[in-house]
Amino acid sequence: MSTTAPTRSVLVLGHDSRAYLAIIRSLGRAGLAVHVGWHRPDSVALRSRYVAKRWELPPFHENSDEWLSALIDLLQRERYDLVFPCNDAAMTAFHRHRGALSAHARLCIPDPQSFDVLFDKIRTNELARAQGLTLPAERVVANHAEAQGAVEELGLPIVLKPRQSYNPENPDEKLMVWKAYTREVFDRALTSLLRAGPVTLQRNFIGIGVGVEVLMKDGEPLLIFQHERVHEPLFGGGSSYRRSVPLDPRLVDEARRLLGALRYTGVAMAEFKLNPRTGEYVFIEVNARFWGSLPLAVAAGANFPLGAYQLLVEGNVRVPPRGRVGLYCRNWYHDLAWLRANIRADKTDPTLSTRALWRVLADRVRNQILLRERSDTFAWDDPAPAVSEARQIASLLIKQTSNALHRRWLSSSIGKRRESRRAARLLASARSVLFVCKGNICRSPYAEVQLRATKPAISVASAGYYPKSGRPSPAHAVTAAAERGLDLAAHRSQRMTRELVAKYDVLCVFDHENLLTVRAEFPDAAGKVVLLGALDGGGLFISDPWGGDLPRFRACYDRITAALARWPAAPK
């Protein structure tokens, strides 16, 4: 790539309403022309006054070159100073094709060695141990057999981590960290994560999340900032409310040792868990990209996006090396969900990140009065994203209320009778039936083979709305079906399509989510969707056994068998 004078333009790729918007604002306020791509249509960041131009680019997929050709054409035409990928999918795309892309623009991504280590949780922990960092007790397992003794050794709750958060083989799937409190949840989480490779099992550490954020050159920090989570999800995940705190020399030292071993250049956040009562802490992971709590750092004056631009384009970082301490920042969209979960949670359980309601209210009042609270989305110079977010929150609350009322109505005696009569009427005259559940690997394939065995005159099939076809039924499903003389071993899931839906007289679903999703995705077929559970009087909804043990599958299949046994007779 030629070293030409800066054009004062950048390309930001991603969709997160937190880091994505913070980067756009940081660079736009500095006078840079900010172009964006790979965004979601409903992203509030697109409303920012600092977005100079939007580009509709094909999404990254490992098995297609369409996205790469379109992106290279854009880079050649616009000649950006710097490209900011700001989520795992974009980072992975640029890492895997950095040779082709770096010929046309500077890229704000780690060097190849750092990427291979820091985007692999197992390799990150191996390096951390080699550098003497403090980690929780852990085991890496490749199958269920290896995990058998882990629960006894590490105890419940236990934390399960995928090797990578992003699966390039299935771009629609984000692999999440789980915290399992029971063996049932542990088995389900392990089954899910093992599909993408080895899983790290860690002993749960009681503490609050702390992030040490850095901009580095060759392993030396040029800008450093620290925050701690005030409101974090009960079972782990990004915070919805956090505050800036003084640097903890112990955590800073561990972050410098880890990233220094890689001679790291760029932005990163080293995440720790800190027990404020005992002072003990453990290293959790590194985000080698811009992180979700970035709006707090930028609001506090730790301007990481602009600093990265100055370092990688101009070679001279001029932003202040520290940020303001004692500032708070809230994400309203996620904090409402946190508040609801916190109210319902057991406040006596030390493994849950709960807070007393009076403390929550006191923080809100005190920090507003002292003018030390900021918002991830609201800014006086750029209010449109917050207005868009407010509309989304209102829409979500209306939808959730409507769904709850609908579920309550269906569960009432009147609602049950109505659904039972409707299901009996439609199924009695049906010559073809499509069973539908979420994934088409547990409930719907069993109902399909069961009905085919008992009602050969009816044309029957099954499908799901989960965005991946060709998945087999889990082992417990195959076993439970075999105990009833039915074969699911050869089953492979298929995804619903309009053409498939149009072929069948009735769509038979199992639970409330199935009902609402199918009606929403296929509104023309809403009138022919019925609940299988309406047939036998045992409750309208048949819950998903996926991830459960064999008894759970047996109970589910017993319920489906009982409902199918009440199949209405055809009218004479």
Image (tube, rainbow, N blue to C red):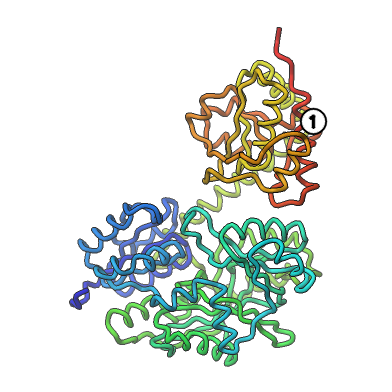
Question: Is residue 546 placed above or below 348 in the rendered structure?
Answer: above
Nearest to the observer: residue 105 or residue 351: 105
Q: Is residue 499 visible?
A: yes
Question: Is residue 234 placed above or below 439 in the rendered structure?
Answer: below
Q: How far across and how far down the image is residue 220, in percent?
A: 43, 90
Residue shown at 65% from the left, 30% from the top: 508
Which image quadrant for residue 265?
bottom left
Question: Is residue 119 placed above or below 566 in the rendered structure?
Answer: below
Q: How far across and how far down the image is residue 467, in percent?
A: 52, 45
Of the 4 image quadrants, the one containing the N terminus is bottom left
Nearest to the observer: residue 263 or residue 387: 263
Q: Residues within 10 Å of mark 1 (few under 14, many from 20)?
A: some
User: Dot 1 corresponds to which residue?
Assistant: 562
Q: How far across and how far down the image is residue 178, in percent?
A: 65, 63
Label 1 sits on what residue type?
Ala
Nearest to the observer: residue 513 or residue 21: 513
